[in-house]
Amino acid sequence: MASISSTIELLSRPEAEAAAAQVRSCSPDLVKAPWNFDGGSLPAYGPGASMADTAPAATPRQGQIPEEYRLASDEELDARILAAKEKLGEKLVILGHFYQRDEVVKYADFVGDSFQLAQAAKEKPEAEVIVFCGVHFMAETADMLSGGDQAVILPNLAAGCSMADMADSDSVQACWDQLAGIFGTEPDADGRIPVMPVTYMNCSAALKAFVGEHGGIVCTSSNAATVLEWAFQRAQRVLFFPDQHLGRNTAKAMGVPLEQMPMWNPRKPLGGNDGQSLLDSKVILWHGFCSVHKRFTVDQIEQARAEYPGVRVIVHPECPMPVVDAADESGSTDYIRKAIAAAEEPTVFAVGTEINMVNRLAAEYPQHTIFCLDPVVCPCSTMYRIHPGYLAWVLEAYAGTATLPGGEILNRISVPESVAVPARVALERMLAARP
Ligand code: SF4
């Protein structure tokens, strides 16, 4: 199966129209480099799954990088990145998220999910700079978990996360105040507080700090059920943000009825609920979602089953509930990887997660047939913002070249201690809650 980069390359060549007809892309702009979308008058997510989402006004922006990086050929960028890596040696660690494009992931020292990568950064205390080829909240987490003298760099500041942006501190605080008005703040006879905030890892450091300050906890898609169990032992109900789907899928699998999972829309009074439904609730779900995983449908699963009888369908729990229900299995990126790695017989897998990861798995396990449930090539818009040109730019600034003195840290992501301290409390609770 072609990688997304080669697929997009195919789509960009007029002579490849026949191939393009078979492999559709969600946006013709995917053939352009991300700097075509930097420096605009308003922040925007750019081409890919989140392109229709509205980026908040405060979303970090990336100015134009020097022309020499924008005009460099792939071969030149490759040579410059490798030279900078070699020069920096142990002083540098490059982290690449599973959803990152192949042209960038090939330079990574570690490839993993957001939490695995933050942990990997921690295990390289000799590295002076950690270049995080992922998105903004991941770089923040790496900064909070790494050593104080290590600098975390995000090669393109516009690489945010549309899901993380769907819950901001002001809206969550406003929700919290309204909930306190309904539930009060006194624990029940069993000592359980009225409501506990639980946040998915995919949120800002400020929200992790909010959660830490209010007795709450962080979860990943691998440990969400364990974390919810921990929360239910200490609270009557949970406010779960920002991903409604992970919250709903996890709580439903634990036996929480759907009618006890009202949705909180931050643009409506009481989130669009009445007081009684909130009093009856077990999990209050924030109105957030991942635009990559929202693309998967039950129809796609039915089509895969019709085309490949016996196909094993695995989807990520950020997919909508009907999709998770129709799949054979659901689990985190790590779960998906391990499930495919463990399959002994040649198997057909239809996978519901980001296309870069699916294509990489297909290349890694040629004994299996592995394809993305979504027939349209549509990567994560924000991961797409990292390109080898940005990587070369930040690496050479620190490593130095014949014309650059080196030692310059560009695009540093630094979380103030006033935020990092309570955020770490919420992260440490998650580690302690592990079964
Ligand atoms: S895949 Fe979804 S949750 Fe992950 S970074 Fe992209 S938009 Fe955010």
Image (cartoon, rainbow, N blue to C red):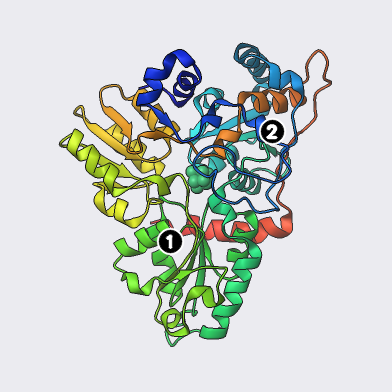
Instruction: From the top left corner, tell me how far across and down residue 401 is, in percent.
Output: 78, 16
**At 41% across and 77% down in the image, what residue appears?**
281
Q: Which mark is residue 227?
A: 1
Mark 1: which amino acid?
Val
Which residue is nearer to you in this view: 308 or 411? 308
**For residue 35, above or below residue 197:** above
Pick whichever of labels 1 and 2 is earlier in the sequence. Answer: 2
Mark 2: which amino acid?
Val
The single residue placed furthest to the bottom in the displayed view is: 189
Estimate the spatial distance between the alpha carbons at disc 1 and disc 2, rounded to whole Å: 32 Å
Dividing the picture into quadrants, the one containing residue 84 is top right
Kindly state the secondary structure of the residue where label 1 is placed. Answer: helix
Instruction: From the top left corner, tell me how far across and down residue 27 is, in percent.
Output: 50, 34
**At 62% across and 73% down in the image, what residue appears?**
174
Can the viewer see residue 186?
A: no
Which residue is nearer to you in this view: 140 or 241? 241
Which residue is nearer to you in this view: 208 or 298? 298
Q: Residues within 10 Å of mark 2 (few under 14, many from 20)?
A: many
Q: Mark 2 = which residue? A: 129
Dividing the picture into quadrants, the one containing residue 20 is top left
Can the viewer see residue 288?
A: yes
Can you say which quadrant of the picture contains the N terminus? Answer: top left
Kindly state the secondary structure of the residue where label 2 is placed. Answer: strand
Instruction: From the top left corner, tell me how far across and down residue 278 is, in percent.
Output: 45, 79
